[in-house]
Amino acid sequence: MFGRTKNKAWKNLENIYKHFKDTQMKDLFATDPKRGELYAEQLETMLVDYSKNRIDDKVLEALFGLARERGLKEKINDMFSGKKINTTENRAVLHIALRNRANTPIYVDGRDVMPQINATLEKVKDFSEAVRLGRFTGYTGKKLTNIVNIGIGGSDLGPYMVCEALRHYWAKGINCYFISNIDGTGCAEVLNKIDPETTLFIVASKTFTTIETLTNARTCRKWLVDALGEHAVAKHFIALSTNKEEVEKFGINPDNMFAFWDFVGGRYSVWSAIGMIIAIAIGYKNFERILDGAFTMDEHFKNTEFEHNIPVILALIGIWYNNFYGVHRYGVIPYDQYLQYLPAYLQQLDMESNGKSVTLDNKYVDYATGPALFGGAGTNVQHSFFQLLHQGTEIVPIDLIVPAISHNEIGAHHQILLANVLAQGEALMRGKTEEEAAAEMEAAGKSQAEINRMKKYKSFSGNRPTNTIVLKKVDPFTLGMLVAMYEHKVFVQSVIWNVNAFDQFGVELGKKLALNILPELQGTAHNIEHDSSTAALIKYIKNIRK
Ligand code: F6P
């Protein structure tokens, strides 16, 4: 076993934790009236307030010490300079190159990657504008107004989340659809709504071997060919992939293929050609603003000392809860309807990156790595799982994200929303003692017997951590910053945990076993050995489907 606990900085944090663990945030606020301003960082159109956490200067200093001991600065430089930090796959990790707006050379195997990235961006620009302006039309000459992205995981969640987040910027008349699940319902429901003559299918798959995507793409292709004939395919299908050979095999014209590269991980690919549907929906200029925002965060991350570095601070606070408080869950609550798919996107980003148990030195970890991430849009979730956040037995750190200005300032809606997000952070931190609950009930004229019976139920332990992230507005630039912030946060945590954030072998076993079970369900293979539960389930389902 690899003994991280033997490290000096880790031991130091364990000692600090022993004395600090029961510290109440409300006492920290009482003793330092400037705490709210001190523990906050602003970058362009984003403010990150991390003051409502169980931290003080000593804790933070020790966490920065841990980052230094883990060589974080060098690791950041390694990523930005194109070093092959994805060691299990022997690849560089260069999503940052996709938004390298300074266009400084970045070398992989002695070759600058920027020219190919710029060329693809130009191609995305030309094609997306041609579709938007009706220069590239469907087979029958009609404008393509239904844009369907067929992909899954990183080839779906990023474009889907960003398109929804920036719905306000969609061109009039353009509709975007997403087909991801192998469940035929996804396909059927989209195909029912659209007209083949005005539909562009974007087959998005890094590997172009993913069974869900290829099955969905084949179904859509057949639907199109049945309606318009084989010749129509070239005008209605494009591919976003790293795998030219498979794209050609599938029958998509290589001229209609938009490339990216193996140094871009699926869950980090929204900035590449995978963003095609975004560029069509919101326009290439707006797409570039997303890249600008991400680049701003990259520069901040690369050049700012840890003490003021937003992704570093958020990552280390996460480590503090995960590895010292033993809290292995974490919530992201965007108070903005447009950002409703952000938690799903971050789930892949965080859990596929850091859900690992083997270190970069090929040893099993003996400490917790990535937490389980969940979330949903506020205020809706206040009426579902927030009960547990306030009064459950475990603490659950959450990020509250809210724009100061809404795209839809209707009446008092946004003021009420803002009041709610701020109130949640305050309530979770402050709580309510039994005495306070009793005093409230007394003021409301309740009997002493009623007060005694109810005061525990009505009290809140408080001391529950939140980060509050205030965005000026959900615009392309700010969204780019926000997403890049989380990417870097995940990376920093992977460095502390000494795991590779850029592979995902954990998704393979289930995929392989599904390929075994499929022929059994189809009746073309029999007697494959399974545990008795799986065997009985196969039998039961086959019986029902007879
Ligand atoms: O199964 C997981 C995964 O490999 C993700 O990492 C990836 O984003 C997704 O599948 C889709 O892969 P592809 O883009 O190659 O179809």
Image: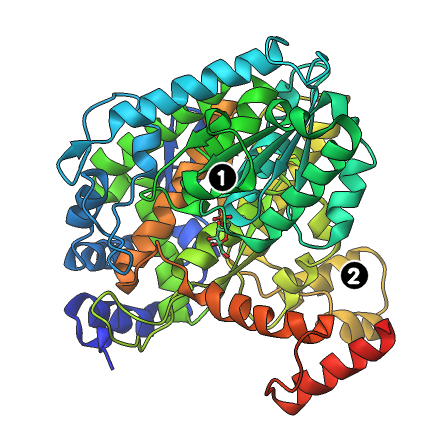
Coordinates of residue 354 in the picture (x, y in percent): 39, 60
Callout 2 touching callout 1 (CB < 8 Å): no
Q: Which mark is residue 31?
A: none
Q: Nearer the viewer, residue 39 or 121?
A: 121
Q: CA distance from mark 2 to mark 1?
A: 72 Å
Q: Residue at x 46, y 50 (%)?
A: 349
Coordinates of residue 387 in the picture (x, y in percent): 69, 61
Relative side of 470 to 311, left or right: right
Q: Residue at x 40, y 22 (%)?
A: 121
What residue is disc 1 on? 247
Amino acid carrying mark 2 in the image: Glu
Q: Residue at x 23, y 52 (%)?
A: 85
Coordinates of residue 185 in the picture (x, y in percent): 78, 50
Coordinates of residue 172 in the picture (x, y in percent): 70, 14
Q: Which mark is residue 442?
A: 2
Q: Nearer the viewer, residue 115 or 76?
A: 115
